[in-house]
């Protein structure tokens, strides 16, 4: 099997776009209304802790991905069972992410285009990228991320220049106290998007210099959190809390408010590009995690499965929910307790415990061997 290595810049851009992903599409923490940006602030510190936990877990077995770590802790037979669980989980989340994008395009950008066509087209692109390898995914993020940063900056400048930002919409701060913020942050924002970083326990095995990657990963989480915080602040400041809560795609609606001199208008393309790049990277990372699980079980290079699994994921994303409201309820309420918390935290913590015990026993045996 081919060994691929990602550069630190590629990991940096992939992590940022991964965290933005569908978080920018549907908005997070909006339930806290005018204090939504404070929810992201709380989530940022939690996200740094979560990322540190996954990095520490991987540092105990450098060069091994999640599936290989489970095998080290238990056995290959047990690891195959867990691999089946995680690969289905990763593919399921990839399908949900793609559905987010399909719903946005169909309802807000191209209403006459069937959602099946939109989803299948993007999934074929993702499948081809993964067929070429994770390095190509890294280069894709590396090449297009500068445009994303520029477009985010332009969006702020144009909304400010057009006089659409009203700071009274975010005042007074903490009008409802800390309870709405904590309620919005825990457990939803912990599982989405920060808990989803578990997918990088597969990706980071392709890092050449893992020690240097630790700092880059934490910086990426910090910067992505700042962008999400700024996005929520912009949404509330332009739309107001009532409109923001009711909107399916609040950032897209905010972008449509730009009107400067009746000349510069409808800059939806900027937001669509930001969302598309984030969705592409996030769905690809999850799909890659699922493909590596298939590779681990059958010991066949994941490239052979890239296109077929991409098509299956596209089909699955269509049938996954009845409509967008059902899609949101399932993702933000049901999945958190049934899937996210057990697979993002409970099982990795158990693996860490077993890993530490095995490491301790190995060190003790080595010391006894030296003494003997």
Image (cartoon, helix red, strand yellow):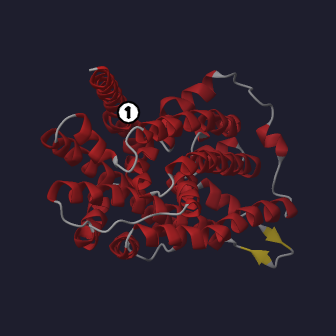
Residue extending farthest front: 372
Q: Please tell me whether residue 141 is drawn above or below residue 96 in the rendered image.
A: below
The correct choice, above or below, for 372 with respect to 65 in the image is above
| Viewer-side residue, 219 vs 240 | 219
Residue 33 position, x and y percent, is: 66, 37
Image quarter (top left, top right, bottom left or bottom right) of the C terminus: top left
As drawn, the residue found furthest toward the bottom would be 263
Q: Quadrant of the N terminus?
A: bottom left
Please say if 9 is above or below 127: above
Element under label 1?
A: helix
Residue position marked by numbered label 1 in the rendering: 341
Residue under the point 33% across and 29% down: 359
The part of the image, by quadrant, that contains residue 16 is bottom right
Q: Residue at x 25, y 54 (%)?
A: 293
How packed mark 1 is, by other alpha carbons closer than 10 Å (few <14, some 14-19, many 20 or more), is: some
- Splitting the image into 4 quarters, where does residue 184 fall? top right
Residue 121 % position (x, y): 38, 76
Left or right of 367? Residue 328 is right
Compared to residue 110, the image places residue 88 above or below, namely above
Residue 35 versus residue 351: which sits nearer the camera? 351
């Amino acid at each position: 099997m081919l060994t691929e290595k990602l550069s630190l810049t590629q990991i940096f851009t992939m992590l940022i776009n991964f965290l933005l992903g569908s978080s920018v599409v549907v908005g997070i923490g909006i339930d806290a209304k005018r204090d939504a940006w404070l929810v992201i602030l709380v989530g940022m510190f939690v996200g740094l802790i979560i990322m540190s936990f996954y990095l520490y877990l991987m540092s105990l077995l450098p060069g091994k991905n999640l599936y290989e770590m489970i095998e080290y802790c238990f056995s290959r037979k047990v690891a195959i069972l867990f691999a089946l669980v995680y690969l289905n989980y990763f593919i399921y989340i990839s399908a949900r992410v793609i559905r987010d994008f399909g719903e946005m395009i169909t309802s807000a950008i191209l209403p006459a285009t069937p959602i099946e066509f939109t989803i299948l087209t993007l999934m074929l692109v993702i499948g081809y990228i993964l067929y070429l390898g994770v390095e190509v995914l890294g280069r894709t993020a590396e090449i297009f991320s500068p445009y994303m940063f520029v477009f985010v900056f332009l969006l702020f400048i144009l909304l400010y220049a057009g006089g659409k930002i009203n700071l009274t919409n975010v005042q007074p701060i903490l009008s409802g106290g800390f309870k709405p913020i904590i309620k919005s942050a825990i457990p939803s924002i912990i599982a989405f998007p920060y808990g989803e970083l578990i997918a990088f326990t597969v990706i980071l095995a392709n890092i050449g210099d893992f020690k240097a990657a630790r700092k880059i990963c934490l910086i990426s989480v910090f910067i992505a959190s700042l962008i999400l915080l700024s996005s929520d602040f912009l949404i509330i400041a332009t739309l107001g809390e009532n409109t923001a809560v009711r909107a399916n795609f609040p950032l897209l609606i905010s972008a449509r408010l730009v009107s400067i001199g009746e000349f510069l208008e409808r800059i939806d393309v900027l937001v669509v590009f930001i969302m598309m790049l984030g969705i592409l990277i996030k769905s690809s990372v999850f799909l890659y995690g699922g493909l590596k699980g298939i590779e681990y079980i059958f010991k066949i290079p994941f490239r052979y499965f890239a296109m077929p699994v991409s098509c299956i994921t596209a089909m699955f994303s269509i049938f996954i929910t009845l409509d967008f409201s059902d899609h949101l309820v399932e993702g933000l309420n049901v999945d958190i307790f049934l899937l996210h918390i057990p697979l993002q935290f409970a099982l990795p913590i158990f693996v860490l415990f077993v890993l530490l015990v095995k490491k301790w026993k190995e060190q003790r045996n080595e010391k006894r061997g030296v003494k003997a």
